Image (tube, grey):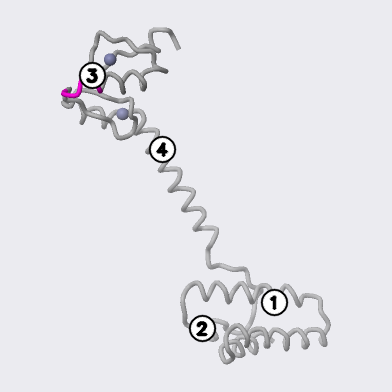
């Protein structure tokens, strides 16, 4: 950046040349000295001060606004991918029964919770013997009864095995 680019002229008094790094300080002081100046202030950058008539033009072309827009665009984007990561498509092993019939009606969150539980249980019993599976099934049934208060949990448990 050349020396000339580092110097900006004060919007309150064009005779004031201000170093870019110092302009915030200068503008605050000059603003107090020119309380009647009919100036427009940029909502994106406190050092952007301009004749009120130029407000519209400035807001259209303000470099800080463009930076901010880009920032919000990126925020929006990452929010989207975060939502995608929370999709309801939990990987379940193939099953001949139609589990949808046993699905509980409820909030989306409940469905996600149920899917997560199923997933954990099925991973948990992989490679277990018949007896172990039986014990596990009983354990899970008790756990589900505690969690859900009975009926619904049993429907899900019986549809698994
Ligand atoms: Zn000034
Ligand atoms: Zn601006």
Helix, strand or loop at label 1? It is helix
Q: Nearer the viewer, mark 3 or mark 1?
A: 3
Number of numbered discs visible in the structure rendering = 4
Instruction: Quickly name the residue at label 4.
Output: 70
Q: Position of residue 161 (x, y in %)?
A: 69, 87
Q: Give the residue pinned by disc 2.
A: 104
Could you say whether the residue bearing mark 4 is in a helix, strand or loop?
Answer: helix
> Alpha-carbon distance for marks 4 and 3?
36 Å
Is ligand 2 less than 8 Å from the beta carbon at label 4?
no
Tell me the quarter of the picture where residue 56 sits. Answer: top left
Judge by depth and name the residue closer to the eye, 82 or 20.
20
Q: Which mark is residue 121?
A: 1
Question: Going by the picture, which residue comes out furthest to the bottom?
Answer: 151
Give the Cα separation between the discs numbered 4 and 1: 44 Å
* Numbered badge on residue 33: 3
Give, as a single range, the part of the protein colored magenta: 32-36
Mark 3 and mark 2 lie on one chain; the one further toward the N terminus is 3
Question: Mark 3 and 1 residues: CB-CB less than 8 Å, in contact?
Answer: no
Q: Is mark 3 within 8 Å of ligand 1?
A: yes
Q: Quadrant of residue 153?
A: bottom right
- If you read the primary sequence from the N terminus, does the residue marked by circle 2 or circle 1 appear first? 2
């Amino acid at each position: 950046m050349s020396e000339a680019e580092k110097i900006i002229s004060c919007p309150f008094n064009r005779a004031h040349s201000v170093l870019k790094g110092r302009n915030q300080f200068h503008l605050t002081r000059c603003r107090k000295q020119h309380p009647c100046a009919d100036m427009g202030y940029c909502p994106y950058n406190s050092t952007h001060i301009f004749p009120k008539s130029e407000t519209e033009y400035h807001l259209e072309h303000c470099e800080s606004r463009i930076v901010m827009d880009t920032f919000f665009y990126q925020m929006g984007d990452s929010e989207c991918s975060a939502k995608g990561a929370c999709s309801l498509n939990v990987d379940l092993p193939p099953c001949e029964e139609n589990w949808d019939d046993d699905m509980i009606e409820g909030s989306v969150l409940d469905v996600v919770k149920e899917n997560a539980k199923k997933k954990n249980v099925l991973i948990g019993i992989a490679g277990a013997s018949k007896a172990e599976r039986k014990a596990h099934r009983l354990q899970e049934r008790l756990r589900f009864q505690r969690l859900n208060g009975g009926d619904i949990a049993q429907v899900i448990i019986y549809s698994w095995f």
